[in-house]
Amino acid sequence: MSYEYRSGLGWDSHRIAVGRPMLLGGVRIESEFGLEGHSDADILLHAITDALLGALALGDIGMHFPDTDPRWKGAASMQFLLHALKLVADKKFEIVNLDTTVILERPKLQDYRQTIREHLAGNMSLPVDAVSVKFKTAEKVGPVGEGRSAEAQALVTVRRKLES
Ligand code: C5P
Ligand code: MG
């Protein structure tokens, strides 16, 4: 059996704001501040969505869901990811694995790792061991390190069976 493999890279950043929720991978994080944004500002879901779109060269999240469109105000970002997954499936590709990093000074996220992995795996119809979620601080340097913003990165590999 031979396959065509493709990879996609996603990145996102949102400003930290008091009075906003913090959602990462669709999971609510207990925190005294959250992330600003037109949608629910889930940077991890946005990075994963862009990685999927990138793997198939289908543009980016803003092209599919413009933040000037009132339909996406306060939107649950899982719907962006589900849309990208459908585009991938329509092109007969399946996901091999997903690797991600969230860069946030605080709060500590490691206790959420398994919940986020399971939530992503469930929504993406993947085994949990194909979904990696990593966390880093920015060592108190730059906007992330100073607690003014948070970032997420995602790398996804997809494959499609080739006709023999
Ligand atoms: O950034 P640093 O290398 O100091 O992070 C050390 C560890 O702390 C990471 O490997 C990660 O498991 C954890 N971490 C965390 N929550 C964060 C940042 C890092 O749990 N917001
Ligand atoms: Mg975003």
Image (spheres, rainbow, N blue to C red):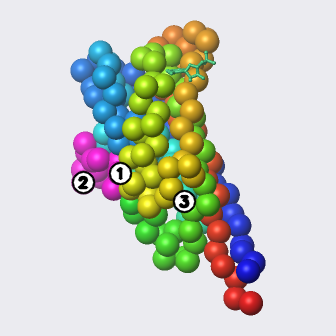
**Amino acid, disc 3:** Leu
Q: Quadrant of residue 22?
A: top left
Q: Quadrant of ligand 1?
A: top right
**Amino acid, disc 2:** Arg
**Residue under numbered circle 2:** 71
Q: Depth check: 67 or 143 in front?
A: 143
152 to the left or right of 3? left
Magenta segment range?
68-81
Structural distance between the alpha carbons of marks 3 and 2: 20 Å
First along the sequence among labels 3 and 2: 3
* Quadrant the N terminus occupies: bottom right
State yes or no: residue 72 in magenta.
Answer: yes
Tell me what residue is drawn at x 57 percent, y 9 percent: 140
Answer above or below: position of 47 versus 20: below
> Is residue 109 among what the camera can see?
yes
Q: Give the x, y percent position of residue 90.
A: 49, 76
First along the sequence among labels 1 and 2: 2
Q: Which mark is residue 78?
A: 1
**Residue under numbered circle 3:** 53
Tell me what residue is drawn at x 69 percent, y 63 percent: 6
Asked if marks 1 and 2 touch (Cβ < 8 Å), the reply is no
Structural distance between the alpha carbons of marks 1 and 3: 14 Å
Q: Give the x, y percent position of residue 79.
A: 33, 56
